[in-house]
Amino acid sequence: MNKIGPIIVIEDDIDDQQMLVEIFKKLGYLNEIRYFTDGNLALEYLNKTDIHPFLILSDINMPKINGFELRNKVFTNQQLQTKCIPYLFFTTAADKKSVVDAYALSVQGFFKKPSSMKGLENTIFKIIEYWTECIAPNEYE
């Protein structure tokens, strides 16, 4: 895990993206934030870049490929597995089936988007702080 790498946000709702832009700016994290409105574009970036992202925040309900399909493609890609990128679902769609399906794909977290800016800010803060402290296998290479 590259704690100074970019944070990949896959979110097709432009309003949600704008709120996240404001929150990341307010929280002052130094990581570059890369936004993608479509899972295929994010996957193309992840496969082509030599950069090791810090983490992936992915919506579930997206056009072209949904978050589950994208997670499966990342999870089964040997090259991406070695980058040790935490994959987290960050979505408004939280139900038992979605949570069970997500963890069946070895996702590292499932978060329901809070409806308020303050709630959203608190959740993003907790996520980033947790993963900043977390140790990954590739730190011992």
Image: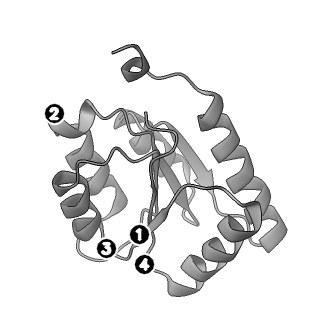
Q: CA distance from mark 1 to mark 2?
A: 25 Å
In the picture, residue 46 is in which quadrant?
Answer: bottom left
Sequence-first disc among 2 and 4: 4
Q: Which label belongs to residue 121?
A: none
- Residue furthest right in the image: 118
In this figure, which residue is indicated by the disc labeled 1? 61
- For marks 3 and 1 on the same chain, the one whose residue lies earlier in the sequence: 3
Q: Residue at x 15, y 33 (%)?
A: 78
Mark before the other along the chain sequence, 2 or 3: 3
Indicate the colouring scheme: one colour
Residue corresponding to mark 3: 38
Could you tell me which quadrant the C terminus lies in? top left
Question: Residue 78 shows which numbered tag?
Answer: 2
**Mark nearer the viewer, 1 or 2:** 2
The quarter holding residue 113 reads bottom right
Q: CA distance from mark 1 to mark 4?
A: 8 Å
Q: Which residue is mark 4?
A: 12
